[in-house]
Image (tube, rainbow, N blue to C red):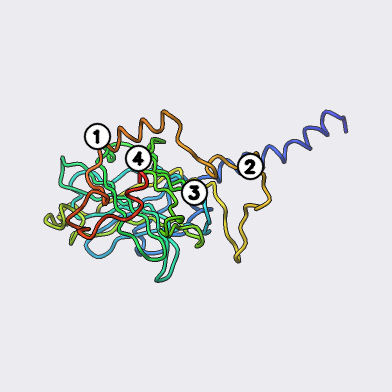
Amino acid sequence: MSPRFSFKMLILPIVMASLWAVASAGNFYNLADITWGEGRGKITGGGRGLSLSLDKFSGSGFQSKNEYLFGRFDMQLKLVPGNSAGTVTTFFLSSQGAGHDEIDFEFLGNVSGQPYTVHTNVYSQGKGNKEQQFHLWFDPTAAFHTYSIIWNAQKIIFLVDNSPIRVYNNHESAGIPFPKEQPMKVYCSLWNADEWATQGGRVKTDWTHAPFTATYRNFNIDGCAVTSGASSCKSTDSANNARPWQNQELDAKGRNRLRWVQSRHMVYNYCADSKRFPQGFSHECKRSRFL
């Protein structure tokens, strides 16, 4: 066997393994389980996509196979087109139990021609009430767009097409709980919530448009998987070896983009709702401009 042939035989398994890793990085067969919907959730394209549907009898949903304690979570999503009033499409992280933690992207449908409402919220130890809502600057039903959650011990960043729309900082020093102890799975679903989702429940789901369908693809996770209580991230890793999301900060461009989104496209901020919180706003509202 020639040295050149030996080298090819040595390098081929490495190349094949690398190609498999790339191919499986966003593969729903490897990353997710469809957990409810009785066939209304379907993995497509050999694992590259997943569709959820909703009819009068049931919605559908899936969850990640693993749970994570911190990470970056990316999903491309194309929302229900046309008259989507009453429907809610979700992409969120959550632990389990009464004192659960949760980080939410929820997309509230509307009548044809009206914009979707992007609803964000953060729960810690079972307490939420930290909602911010936005209208997008594009049609989220016409093409796929990327929605991302960066979660580390210092902050949570919500991004749309890599533009930050919200930053929620850790204010534990002020006695405000922050989600950093409970591992969470990724959950996605499409369901009927017409008692509250569209214009406060005034517009109901029109079932003549069913089934409603939302499509997911390019599901990518760069995070610390937790198995039997042990994290895949080493606590001994130096700052130089940290992954970008572990110490994520907004640069000047990111801060400007965040200001633009919040000034032009925010439609609700719990830190400005004096009717809902007549006793005064949560302490973090006074400590940080961007929540």
Q: Can the viewer see residue 45 in this picture?
A: no
Pointer 4: what residue? 165
Q: Can the viewer see residue 282 in this picture?
A: yes
Pointer 3: what residue? 154
**Camera-side mark, 4 or 3:** 3
| Between 140 and 133, the one nearer to me in the picture | 133
**Camera-side mark, 1 or 3:** 3
Residue type at mark 1 is: Arg
Q: CA distance from mark 1 to mark 3?
A: 26 Å
Vertical order, 63 against 221 (above or below): below
Residue type at mark 4 is: Ile
In primary-sequence order, the first of circles 2 and 4 is 4
Pointer 2: what residue? 239
| Between 152 and 28, the one nearer to me in the picture | 152
Residue type at mark 3 is: Gln
Packing grade of label 3 (10 A; few <14, some 14-19, many >=20) is some
Q: CA distance from mark 1 to mark 4?
A: 11 Å
Pointer 1: what residue? 264
Q: CA distance from mark 2 to mark 1?
A: 36 Å
